[in-house]
Amino acid sequence: MSIALDQVTKRYQDQPVVNDVSIEVGEGEFFVLLGPSGSGKSTLLRAIAGLTGIDHGRISLHGRDVTHVRARDRGVGLVFQNYALFRHMTVADNIEFALRVRRMKRADRVARRKELLKLVALEGLDERLPGQLSGGQQQRVAVARALAHKPQVLLLDEPFGALDAKIREELRRTIRSVQRELGITTVLVTHDQEEAFALADTIGVMNHGRLLEVGHPHDLYAQPATRFVATFLGAANLLLARQSADGIRFGATPVNAEGAERIHAGREHEVVAVLRPEEVELAAAREQLSSNFIARGAVEEVAFTGALERLRVRLLDEPSAAQLLGSGSAAEARVEVTRTQPERRALPLRSGMQVALGARRLHVLPTPISSFLACAPTESEAEVLAREPLLESLSTRMKTRVALRAIDALAVAPVPIAGVAAIAAGDNAATTVEWLLEHGAAEVLVLPRQAPSPTRVYIHWTDEAVRRATLAVSASLLRHVSAEAVYLGIVPEGAQGTGRAAPMRQLLDARSEAQTVHNLEMRTELAIGETVTEITRNLSAGTAQMLVLGITDIRQAGTAYRSLLAAQPGWPVLIVYRPAESRIRPEIAA
Amino acid sequence: MKGPRREPNVIPGFGITLGFTTFFLCAIVLIPLAALVLKAGGMEWERFVGVITSPRALASYRLSFGASLLAASMNMIFGFAIAWTLVRYDFPGRKIIDALIDMPFALPTAVSGIALTAVFAGNGWIGQYLEPLGIQVAYTWIGITVALTLIGMPFVVRTVQPAIQEVQRDLEDAAETLGAGRFYVFRRIIVPTVLPALLTGFTLAFARAVGEYGSVIFIAGNMPMKTEITPLLIYIKLEEFDYVGAAALGVVMLSISFAMLLAINLLQVWGRKRMMVSR
């Protein structure tokens, strides 16, 4: 491996900006770190360069552990967004800087400089000052300067940020060809997905300090595993659908969707489907669609953008048809559609016209948390619950909705429960959890009043049968909060020999599964004693703690774990329930 | 109006503003200086040369300009250090120290002079420890330099501060990844970038020191040939009603100061051209 990061964590004022990131970049690979601003990608790049120390983890370059090696001894080349050229030096002096530091002979220096200037197509500009060059030329000089000492690794921090579109593309091509020619391992940081697609062999998407997914650009685009990657890499319409053994349904409309086989079968449950704007087919009537009908809609906006036409279509017949997850409230959600010119000519559309929407290709996200359902005795209490800061921030970050349900109404007419049910912590919470699990809920989030966003999430399950499901839900949750994950293994007091060995093995299994399947770095702790006592002790040990609890027996929630669901002192508890027979269920949920 | 129309500016009337500038410069700077030169021109050449090359006058030039250069140089070094500390580090009391820098601006110079004399005199707070070491500060050229350093300090700090703020961390980071050590970065990156501002600060501090009078006369002791600065010599001539002699010395000071300031300015222009053609 050319670059290997192992569980790298960097904190600023106790807030992790880079959270347990492990990456391996192969020899000669062009790796793009993609993420919105503040996702920790630049910090990670600076950590690789050695300009920022890390709090935890290891960094190796070409097999050499450089975690504690200073930047100047790491042998990396770094290119900055604002060029960072030495303005009082000529182009020649800038490029030769690293060579002078190394006391290289003048003739060799000049030869190397000429070679580099040729590489970046700036021959003859040796004696210019940076101030006399255009932005694009300055960045070329910066690239040449970063390559002068033949670094093993080239790092680029948003190198095109300050340039206009045309020059950006030209420079992009230069950098790509230079990288190919030298075969140098390269890491580029950007927030621009187009740039990432144009350059990357491999893309790693970061958000909130975590590395969410790594993969080839096409795979990430076609089969994202998380909502964030689906919406950040290109545009995406997220739809709530119901999945059962028969396939996918939008309301009453069955659809054959790709990716469906990746989700566990079993009871019908809610899933999130990704529909790319270019995969939406529009037709005047349902019968004229060549793909799966999903809903009827009214065109609201038509915009011409050159090669493509962009439309926004409001769905009609909600919620009997497809349910959209928009950025804002459900009422604002619109399906984004792009059409090519031939498509546009075949069916010219104006705003106000009614159309039938079809999905040429749907991808079902393997995420176990599709949406939230705030449950309370009355509708208004449910509304208050939905505004709980933790629930609100989770639903915003997950780009999903919080539906409301009055539990009384639910008791009268049991409508299937979709998504994660959320209830308030309290004396009745345990009973309510039991009731919800009996009526089809698979996950219940118990929320104390005004619970802060957790900084540490304890994970525990009572039976190995729910390990997969609990880990999947925990991983999904932890992608959206900046918290560390801790698996809590508990050995009963007085256990001897094999009674002790088994929990240890489970601990290691859990850790490796979290890492390989979910890319989740999870600490493990082993406690000896009674389960509830030990969980309570750990939760009480700090502030802003949360628990994810996997159970196989509905009664467990009501009896053994009742004290964990009380309003005081009160921790957010996410209960993951899978009946014990689900042992055989193939669950690869991510 | 003929010719191309001017772009409207925030302050109206190029004619008015230029006229005002010229008038102001004339009334405050040029006419008084011309009067000085005219006054000195009133004496015959031999006497003029005699006055300005008298051993007492020559000693005073050496002291005045020598101590000023030394003080400005010290300010350049320590002022840079102070400015660097204030810009780059955050520590409790930083704001207060930042405000204290300007104190020498506000203090009547005579007060600074008296305070310095009290501290550095043989029985003063600092003087009593220096005296046994054989270092006499008050009433020697060292004291004069100390006084001139004090009053010139804010000039350097205040001009260098913004320049240091402009040295991007990225530049240092870039140099570091290219293999440069700390001292190399300082010598090859930071100093060249800050140099123009440093020179400006030096110029201001020097100019101020040459013209300084109030704070020096208390600590200098004013012994002819030894600790007598040129401004004091001019004052003595005035007391003796030798107006023409005073004017002659004034003209010399004026010429030397002008020559030195011009030289430093040219050096700066050259440096700036070399450094950044367009910012």
Image (cartoon, rainbow, N blue to C red):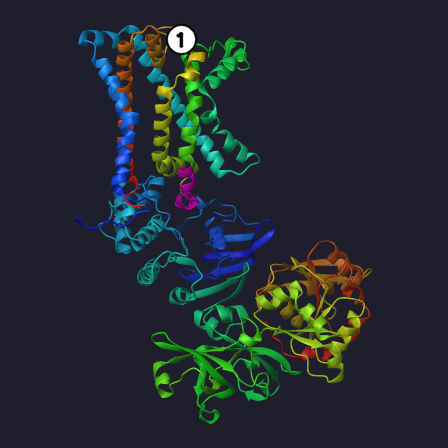
Q: How many marks?
A: 1
Q: Report which residue position mark 1 lands on.
A: B222
Q: Position of residue A72 (x, y in %)?
A: 43, 44
Residue B273, visible in the rendered structure: no
B224 inside magenta stretch: no
Mark 1: amino acid: Asn
Left or right: residue A588 compared with residue A569: left
Residue reaching furthest left?
B2
Residue A137, visible in the rendered structure: yes
Identify which residue, B183 or A424, lies in the foreground: A424
Q: In which image quadrant can residue A375 be found? A: bottom right
For label 1, the SS is: loop
Left or right: residue A62 compared with residue A480: left
B166 inside magenta stretch: yes
Mark 1 Cα-neighbour bin, 10 Å: few <14, some 14–19, many ≥20? some
Chain letter for mark 1, please: B
Q: Position of residue B89 (x, y in %)?
A: 51, 38
Q: Position of residue A455 (x, y in %)?
A: 65, 57
Residue at x 40%, y 42% (from the top left corner): B166
Residue at x 58%, y 85% (from the top left corner): A249
Q: What stretch of residues is rendered in magenta? A: B162-178
